[in-house]
Image: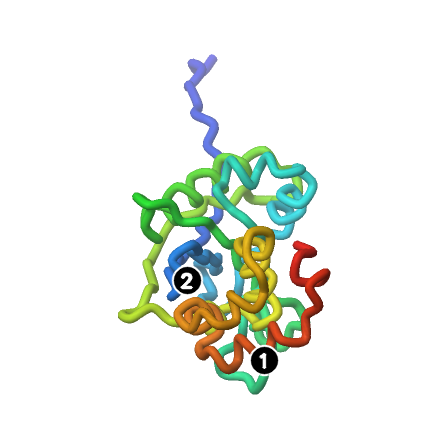
Amino acid sequence: MSPFVSKKITTNKQTVWLDSVGTAVDDFVLHWCTKNNKPTDAAYIAPLKQAFMDSAGQLADAWHVKAFLFRRDPMAEGNQYLPNREGSNFGWDVMVSVQGQDDTPTSLGTQLAEELTAFAANVPDFRTPPAFNFRHDLTTNPPRPLNYYLCDGDCLSLLKRLYSQDNEKDSIMENEELMTSYFGSIELGQQLLRPLSDAVWKDVD
């Protein structure tokens, strides 16, 4: 009889790249995920997004993520989402982190990759558990305005979350540095904020 041979059970994982970028808005760092074997396509993270939305804020705290949004297509006219792959009608997910005083895109991206890998290992919707790996800090010098990466409406939503409860709309509209960091120019920022009633300004979505 042949002797028993000890076998080690291994779990194959699919590598996913996670890139992070800082913007002219110091408060936020953005992250998105790309397929390892197809760099023009977004990685499949729908189960993680759904878990985030269902967690009533618990995963927001654990992952240091404030929101899931979609990347803006910087090459397209107007406000259009970047598709998650060529020919797709679905947007490319982007995660928004709040940046603390000692945080960097690299530190936040590395930590997020570790958190997502650990969580995804227990999500049955993944046929092969993804292993998220931080790849690049894509921050430019100087950093680009937030609306280079996100559509104007999403930038407005993030602006309201931070400022609407403690600030009047008119005072925010006159803050050129703030408007430029979010929207690229004070003129566009004012154009977007001016039609909002006070009630809508205070209503954080």
> What's the residue at 62%, 49% (across, down)?
49
Depth check, front residue: 76 or 127:
76
Mark 2, other Cα within 10 Å: few <14 / some 14–19 / many ≥20? many
Label drawn at residue 26: none
- Colouring convention used in this rendered image of the protein: rainbow
Q: CA distance from mark 2 to mark 1?
A: 19 Å
What amino acid type should be assigned to the residue bearing mark 2?
A: Val
Marks 2, 1: nearer the viewer: 1
What kind of residue is marked 1? Gln
Residue at 52% across / 66% down in the picture? 171
Q: How many marks?
A: 2
79 relative to 74 in the view: left or right: right
Q: Position of residue 150 (x, y in %)?
A: 53, 68
Q: Is residue 68 visible?
A: no
Residue 191: image tag: 1
Residue at the outermost left position: 141
**Mark 2 = which residue?**
25
In the rendered view, would you say 9 is above or below 198? above
User: Is disc 2 placed on a helix, strand or loop?
Assistant: loop
**Foreground: 104 or 127?**
104
Q: Image height check: is 118 above or below 196?
A: above
Q: In the image, residue 46 lies at what x, y percent?
A: 63, 52
Say which quarter of the image contains residue 101: top left
Q: Is residue 167 above or below residue 146?
A: above
Residue drawn at 42 percent across, 19 percent down? 5
